[in-house]
Amino acid sequence: MMKNNCNFLDNFFVNLVPFFAEEDKQKELTKPKVSRYFQQYTDLFGKINWSELVNNELMNHMVKIEQTRQCLERNNGDSYTGLLEYLYKEDSASTLEEIIQQYDFILKWKEARHLRDAINFIYANVILANINPESQYIIPYQDLRNLLIKIIDQPTPFSEILPLHYITVLLLRKEEDCTLPPFVSQMKLSYLQDLRPVSNGKRAAVHFYLGKDKGYGGLISHRDINHCLGSEQNISTKWNDEKMWKRVRDCEKLYRVSGQICGGFISALDVKVDPMFRSQLPKESDRRVSFFIGFSMNGPVALDIDFES
C-alpha cells in the first residue's frame, strides 16, 4: 500500500503541472516528504537476506531477478513516471544506464518478465538517448521500435494503457504503417479516468516535442527547449509569449506541422490535436494552421499556432 501511494503521488507530480505558475508550490512542499517516506520504505522492505533462500540453480537465478527488481525500485526505475522524472534531473545518465542493463537482464528470462518491464525498458532508452545520445547502452532506435510494435499487439491491462500508448505515440509519431488515432483516443480516456479527477488547477505536462530529425533525435525534451531559451527560462510559464516562441523557432529543433481547424481542435494526419488553450482557435472551422506539437499524457498539444495563407 505504501508503494502504491508513492506511485500515485509520483504520477501526480510528474504528469500534472500548474497552468501558469512559475513554480509548483504544492510539489515543492510535498515532494521532499514523499521522497523521505519512500526511502524509509526501501530501508524497511528492501533488505532481505536472500542468501539463506538459495538452494538450487533455479532459485539462485530467481533471487538475482528479485534483487534486480529491488534495485530498480530503489532508483525509481520500476515505473514510467519515475523514469520520466530523470528527464528533469542533473547527472542522471549513469543511473539510467544501470537501469537499462537491469531490464536487459530481466527481459532475457521469459518466466520472469512482465509487460511493464518491456514498457519501462523502452522509456529508459528514450530518456537516456535524450540526456546522453552517445551512451553505449542505448539500443538502436529500429530495435526499440520493433520491440514496441511486438508488445502493442498483446492484450494490455488498463493500468498499462496510459504509459504504453504514450510511448507508442512518441516512437511511432511519423510511421506510415501505424494508425495513431486509436492509441491517442485510448490514452486520453485513460488520462480522463486516472489523472483528470485529481488535476484541480493543473494540466497535463508536456514532456517531449516533435523534432525535425528521425529516430531518437525526433523527440525534443522539455529541458532541451528551456536550454534554447537560456538560463532561468521555463517554457511552461510563457505559452503565449511571442518573443519566447521566436527564440524557439530560431533554434530550428522543432518540426512544424500543418493542420485544419475542426471545431475545437486541429486535425493533422487524421490525429486530433488539442490547442493548449481553446481561446487560441477561432470559432470558424476549415482554416489551415501550422504549429508545433507537444506530447502530453492527455494527447498531442498544438503550440505556437499560426494561420496559413
Image (cartoon, grey):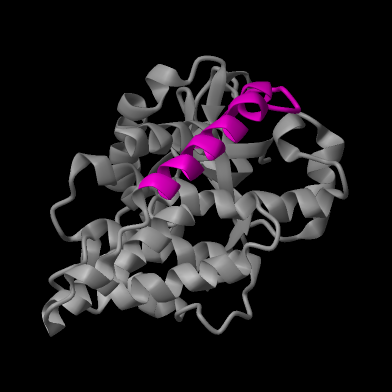
Quadrant holding the N terminus: top left
Where residue 246 sits: x, y (%)? Answer: 83, 45
In terms of depth relative to the viewer, which is nearer, 158 or 27?
27
Quadrant holding the C terminus: top right
In terms of depth relative to the viewer, which is nearer, 208 or 53?
53
Magenta span: predominant SS is: helix
User: In this figure, what is the number of numbered marks?
Assistant: 0
**Horizontal side of residue 152 vs 202, given as left or right:** left
Residue 27 colored in magenta in the image: yes
Q: Is residue 116 above or below residue 2?
A: below
Kindly tell me whether residue 176 is visible in this rendering.
no
Where residue 126 sits: x, y (%)? Answer: 50, 65
Name which quarter of the figure residue 101 lies in: bottom left
> Which residues fall within the magenta stretch?
15-44
Where residue 158 sits: x, y (%)? Answer: 21, 40
Residue 128 colored in magenta in the image: no
The residue at the point 34 percent across, 28 percent down is 194
Name which quarter of the figure residue 33 lies in: top right
Q: Is residue 157 above or below residue 104?
A: above
Find the residue positioned furthest to the front.
52
**Horizontal side of residue 165 vs 254, given as left or right:** left
In terms of depth relative to the viewer, which is nearer, 135 or 185?
135
The residue at the point 38 percent across, 18 percent down is 197
Kindly tell me whether residue 268 is visible in this rendering.
yes
In terms of depth relative to the viewer, which is nearer, 34 or 292?
34
Q: Is residue 125 above or below residue 254?
A: below
The residue at the point 45 percent across, 81 percent down is 140
The residue at the point 30 percent across, 25 percent down is 193
Where residue 8 sits: x, y (%)? Answer: 39, 33
